Amino acid sequence: MKRFFSILLLAAYVIFLAGCFRDGSAPETDTELFVIGFSQSGSESDWRLANTDSMIETFTEDKGYDLQMENAKQQQENQFAAVRSFILEGVDIIVIAPTMEEGWDTVLKEVYDAGIPVIIMDRSVNVWNDDLYLTNVGSDFLGQGNRAVEWLEGQTEGEELKILHLQGTYGTTAQLLRSQALEDGVSAHDNWELAGQICGDFTEAKGYEAMTEFLSENTDFNVLYSENDNMTFGAIRALDEAGITYGEGGQVRIITFDATSAALQLCFDGKVDLCVECNPLQGPSVEELIRQYRAGEDIPKQVYIEEALFTKDDLTQELIDGRTY
Ligand code: GZL
């Protein structure tokens, strides 16, 4: 009789164990990867490609991460779809490099209700309640623009300035705040005026198209304030075709944002007057914030990345060659 109950007990134990692995998945172990759903806004610029590389190089499997990246091709709807797929997948955290600032309330509420934390990287989102995300790590875009305006003030004491404003993708934080800084600067100087405001969508091709179209009607400006390097590269091509000189001793001073190595080289060669750095290497900062979150530490709602200004005097060929983007 005892033998019978032993067999019965053993049978019950075997059935119990089978139930633990019903779905065939292994039990949770400390070797399980931390899954990051990353919605990248696009591939529009050298800056963006470097930003993507920084995330891929930081969140590797041998460091315990499973980085699942979706590229939105600069379309916010694609980001919403990616975020919703991350919710369904039950990732451990979602990182978003947003296209536009507006429009995020609904999908971030869905993430919030699913209990998944969100880190906003690079630009910002404008939502009714910032509890919908853990933190925003990125650039101080208004500070970038204000430093560019201060530099221009210092370079052109009292000169009559006609500024052509080449803007990035409308509605992105980088465009909104870099534009605000210039518009505030123009309002504060009676001897400054905007020769025009055109949009290059942060790409070289559209920067070239927008500049070419503008130059067909107006060449009366002496400053180009271009909201990223790739648009600047396109604009320079259009200036060359129009026979307009720029940079050191040229008709047009050029201010450009991002400080990619190609732009720094133009600055060092006297073709561009000011490079305003916008640091794309944000993977390590995001990783540190994730570490703080997993450790239950307090996290600031806004974290700014260190950035600088470069003129020709600040540059050496060695510095440029040593840049990673
Ligand atoms: C800045 C980023 C901007 C870059 C552009 O953080 O949002 O978008 O300045 C990029 O190069 O397209």
Image (cartoon, helix red, strand yellow):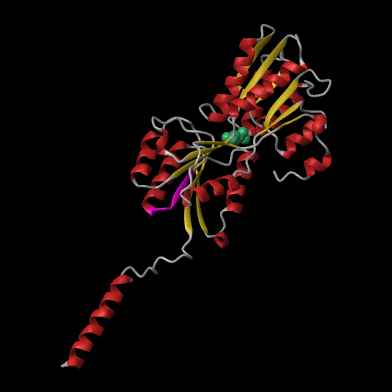
Camera sees residue 276: yes
In the image, is 71 to the left or to the right of 253? left
- Per the rendered image, the range of residues in magenta is 89-95
Quarter placement of the N terminus: bottom left
Camera sees residue 52: no
The single residue placed furthest to the top in the displayed view is: 190
User: Which quarter of the rendered image does ligand 1 occupy?
Assistant: top right
Number of numbered callouts drawn: 0
Q: Where is residue 91 in the image (x, y as percent from the top left)?
A: 42, 53
Q: Is residue 236 above or below residue 132?
A: above
Quarter location, residue 208: top right
Q: Which of 151 and 107 is in front in this view?
A: 151
Q: Nearer the viewer, residue 299 or 240?
A: 299
Q: In this view, does 146 lie above or below 56?
A: above
161 falls in the magenta region: no
Q: Position of residue 245 (x, y in %)?
A: 79, 21
Name the residue: 58% across, 42% down.
43
Name the residue: 69% across, 12% down.
162
In the image, is 291 to the left or to the right of 278? left
The single residue placed furthest to the left in the displayed view is: 1
Q: Which of 314 and 41 is in front in this view?
A: 314
